[in-house]
Each structure stands twice: as C-alpha cells, then as structure tokens.
Image (cartoon, rainbow, N blue to C red):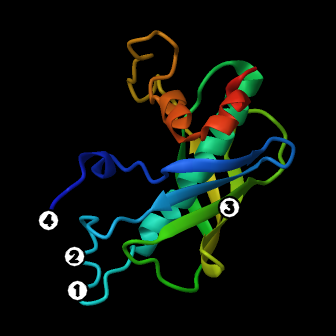
Amino acid sequence: MSKVDSRRIHWQWLDRVTAFDLDRRSLVAERDIGAEEWYLEHHYPGFPVLPGVFLIEAMAHALAVLQGTLTFRATGAWHAYVLAMAHEARFYSFVQGGETACIEASLTPREDGPGPVEGRALVRVGERKIARARLTLQQLDAEALGATPGEDGAGDPFKLGAYVRMLLTPPLQPILAR
C-alpha cells in the first residue's frame, strides 16, 4: 500500500459543509481529493480517478450528516445513519486527484419517525456533473451493535456530533443551536 493519510483511512468522506438550508432539508458539502490518496495508485494506473463507490459513500455521508443534524435539532440526540441502498446511480465523468468534489444533497420529504431515510445527491467538480443517485439510509441501532454512549456521556456512540462540528464552516456553526 502506498502512503496512507490516517484520517482518510477512517472513511471520513467529507471535508466541509459549505451550505445548509434547514427549510429545504438540503446541504452542500465538499471533499478534496488529494493527489496522493492511497487508492489512486491502483485505480487506475496511468489514469488515477476516484472510484465510483467512494462517490456513492460521499453522497451517503452528506445525507447522513444532513439527517443527523436535523434529528439533533429536533430531539437533542445524535443518531447515525448508514447507506442501505443506492438507486438510480448515474456516473457522467471522473474525479481525479487534486480536484474538489462538491456534493449537493437533499432529503426526500417523509413523515417523522423511525424507518429508512431517502434523499438525492449530485456530485460536481466545478460546473462538470460527475454523478447523481437516490439513496436510502438506515439509522444505526447503537444498542444492538453494542456501542457505548461515548466518553462524554452525550449519548453519541458513533461520534456523529463531533464529525458534524468538524465539517460545519464557522458561519454554519449556529445551525447546531437548538
């Protein structure tokens, strides 16, 4: 394996959230694709591009951050979400090292309560459309997975709150105020 950035190997697929619209239940996030990302050496030699499955994961992260934040604002509790299904995924172009992928994500309106969460995401690099998909996320059941509430006792066993706080640009930090 080539040089590995330890933060990246933990699969944090977003670097920042640059826009958040509470009323429209949407956000815009970015992911900087470093020229030395560990997977580029092998995907593909001579034409290194971000694997499509990683684009889907970045879209899922954007939707999970969006739903997790909305749930936190409504309940005061953090709930983590994981990709359950990808629908209607389309790929139009490639993302190469050194580019920034912009993910526009929005949740499909639904009645509040337990159950799957659906949304749509679009990935662009500049004005170039890269990919789109409709995704279904499932809330993780911390208790069933044996996860503990975390050292701070805040009831955030998957540390989604810390991830969201890291991603929100300073002007967006007030979104976490309830």
Foreground residue, 169 or 61? Answer: 169
Element class at badge 1: loop
The residue labelled by disc 2 is: 41
The residue labelled by disc 3 is: 104
Contact (Cβ within 8 Å) of mark 4 with mark 2: yes
Residue 133 point in image, percent of width and height: 64, 69
Q: Amino acid at mark 4?
A: Ser
Element class at badge 3: strand
Q: Which mark is residue 45?
A: 1
Any part of residue 88 in sight: no
Total numbered labels:
4
Element class at badge 4: loop
Foreground residue, 29 or 158? Answer: 29
Decide: is 152 above or below 110: above
Q: State how far apart marks 1 and 4 are (Cα).
A: 13 Å
Q: Amino acid at mark 2?
A: Glu
Q: Which mark is residue 2?
A: 4
Q: Amino acid at mark 3?
A: Glu
In screen coordinates, is 19 left or right of 2? right
Q: State how far apart marks 2 and 3 are (Cα).
A: 28 Å
Contact (Cβ within 8 Å) of mark 2 with mark 1: yes
Q: Quadrant of residue 176?
A: top right
Residue at left offset 37%, top offset 79%: 49
Disc nearer the start of the sequence (2/3): 2
Q: Quadrant of residue 172?
A: top right
Q: Which mark is residue 95?
A: none
Q: State how far apart marks 2 and 1 are (Cα).
A: 6 Å
Q: Quadrant of residue 79?
A: top right
